[in-house]
């Protein structure tokens, strides 16, 4: 949701709002998991570089989350849609009572035709920013956790490349896209490289972790390029777009 110089990409906000609104109009229930609070907050606060101290990261996240939700509210409202904000941390998933309350909240919002917009609660949860053993790690894992919690049929992870390749396409022009994987084994994991976008924290490794969690619960997981949200139309029709990890039946 940010451009090459770290500022909010308004076209991306508009495109995703348009496509998701249209898909909901077709009768589908939609949940959007969206990151970028620290990146957007860093820009809003006119910081020259991403903050390194915990207190400044959390301050940037608090400011950035306001900006992100303002933009989503504006663009979804253009398509006559109401959104809701849900911020999560690890305890929300680990404590059974909180987990049940979250499920009830998601169910109620979806029943009312509201599109939940989910992010990590970075402004108060330092473990989700710093810990190597954090539950979410980044938005890929967060989206998988939410998909399992809400009993989703499909999880679509929007990346900055077209899918999963036999090597990094940014370094190897002859890299081939793999269209379908039925099981995530050591051979598949060995193909995952390091981090992707320099502004995000997720690479293909975390996407594989997310896909493994979701597919274990029977949820088909697709990785595709976020620059083309209209690919979601083909995905909901069952078409071959990006990379499909088949959910266990």
Image: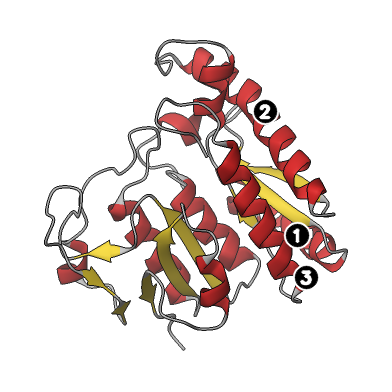
Alpha carbons under labels 3 and 1: distance apart: 18 Å
Q: Position of residue 25 (x, y in %)?
A: 78, 70
Discs 3/1, front: 3
Q: Residue at x 85, y 54 (%)?
A: 80
x and y percentages locating residue 194 in the rendered image: 22, 45
Q: Residue 4: name its quadrant.
A: top left
Residue 243, numbered label: none
* Residue 182 seen: yes
Q: Earlier in the sequence, mark 1 or mark 2?
A: 2
Q: Distance from label 2 to label 3 (Cα)?
A: 26 Å
- The secondary element bearing badge 3 is classed as helix
Q: Nearer the viewer, mark 1 or mark 2?
A: 2
Left or right of 209? Residue 226 is right
In the image: residue 42, left or right of residue 241: right
Q: Which residue is mark 3?
A: 25
Q: Quadrant of residue 205?
A: bottom left
Residue where numbered disc 2 is placed: 67
The residue carrying pointer 2 sits among few (fewer than 14), some (14 to 19) or many (20 or more) residues within 10 Å by Cα, namely some
Q: Nearer the viewer, residue 211 or 77?
A: 77
Query: Which residue is most to the bottom?
Result: 249
Residue at the spot 47% in from the left edge and 82% down from the top edge:
239
Residue 106 marker: 1
Q: Is residue 87 above or below residue 221?
A: above
Where does the image place residue 217, in percent across and percent down from the top left?
50, 76
Q: Of 1 and 136, which appears nearest the observer?
A: 1
């Amino acid at each position: 949701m940010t451009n090459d110089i770290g500022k909010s990409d308004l076209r991306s906000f508009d495109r995703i709002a348009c496509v998701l609104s249209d898909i909901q109009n077709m009768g589908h229930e939609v949940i959007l998991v969206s990151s970028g609070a620290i990146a957007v907050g860093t820009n809003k606060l006119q910081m020259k570089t991403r903050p390194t101290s915990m207190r400044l990261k959390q301050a940037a996240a608090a400011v950035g989350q306001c900006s992100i939700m303002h933009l989503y509210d504006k663009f979804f409202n253009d398509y006559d849609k109401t959104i809701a904000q849900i911020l999560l941390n690890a305890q929300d998933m680990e404590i059974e009572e909180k987990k049940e309350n979250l499920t009830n909240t998601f169910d109620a919002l979806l029943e009312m035709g509201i599109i939940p917009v989910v992010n990590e609660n970075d402004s108060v949860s330092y473990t989700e920013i710093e810990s190597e053993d954090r539950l979410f790690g980044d938005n890929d894992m967060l989206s998988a956790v939410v998909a399992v919690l809400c009993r989703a049929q499909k999880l679509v992870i929007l990346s900055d490349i077209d899918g999963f390749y036999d090597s990094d396409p940014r370094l190897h022009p002859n890299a081939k896209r793999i269209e379908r994987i039925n099981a995530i084994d050591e051979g598949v994991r060995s193909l995952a490289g390091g981090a992707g976008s320099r502004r995000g924290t997720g690479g293909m490794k975390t996407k594989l972790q997310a896909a493994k969690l979701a597919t274990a619960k029977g949820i088909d997981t697709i990785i595709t390029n976020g620059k083309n949200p209209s690919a979601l139309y083909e995905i909901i029709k069952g078409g071959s777009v990006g990379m499909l990890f088949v959910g266990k039946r």
